[in-house]
Amino acid sequence: MKYLIAILFLTLFSVNSFAQSESSAIARGPAMKPGIPASKAEVKYPDSTAFNAEFKELYPLIKPTPTVSERTDRAFEMMSHMFKARGVDSAKAYEAVMKSVDNSMDQKILFDEYRKNFTADELKSIVSFYKTPAGKHYLEVEGPLMQARGQAIDAYVHREIAMAITPLMKPISPEERGAMNHGIPSGHPGAPAMGAPAMGAPHSQMPPANSH
């Protein structure tokens, strides 16, 4: 039950976020595909010249680390253990990957996202803030702040929902628990009730949604 509620909550949250994003994009102008160069952006946005100038000021302040090349090296190393079994020559694979990867894609991705969400005047204000001591400090702690605004709050909500609803659920019998542990599908005689937790089991042991 906890997982079903969590899925429902996340679905509603995602739909609402998507709708707000679409409304914002419509108000500001048509969205670009990832990697569209600034020269083509000028056709779709009347303030592109000013925006491009502001983004050149912004990017050094928000440039991601590690770089695309460094991330590629790391990801390649994590995957390399399977190459021998699949008959892949590591040296050739690395060469092919490095030819495929665009090392400037981090800048293009960030440009597209800022272009979809901000005007040139708004970006100018953002750049001015990031250059202040408070703005520089914000960039240093941005990761934990974003996690607190999203994942931490969602985790709290899901936990509270589960803790409030769990006491209202009917305990399951040993027979039902055994059927659940053996993966008997929902509707089968002896299958557990949907979302019912094991008798005396802690909240974290409630059956996942795909056990039905």
Image (tube, grey):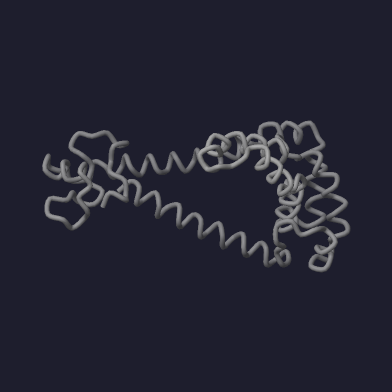
Count up the numbered dots.
0
| Image: 89 above or below 123 | above
Residue 145 falls in which quadrant of the image?
top right
Q: Nearer the viewer, residue 148 or 204?
A: 204
At 60% from the left edge and 40% from the top edge, which residue is drawn?
146
Q: Nearer the viewer, residue 78 or 149?
A: 78
Q: Residue 105 at x, y = what percent? A: 74, 48
Image position of 50 (left or right of 174): right
Q: Residue 172 at x, y = what percent? A: 15, 43
At 32% from the left edge and 39% from the top edge, which residue is drawn?
163
Residue 150 falls in which quadrant of the image?
top right
At 78% from the left edge and 53% from the top edge, which residue is drawn?
122
| Image: 105 above or below 12 | above
Q: Nearer the viewer, residue 75 or 124?
A: 75
Q: Residue 102 at x, y = what percent? A: 74, 48
Image position of 163 (left or right of 14): left
At 54% from the left edge and 34% from the top edge, which residue is drawn?
81
Q: Residue 84 at x, y = what percent? A: 54, 37
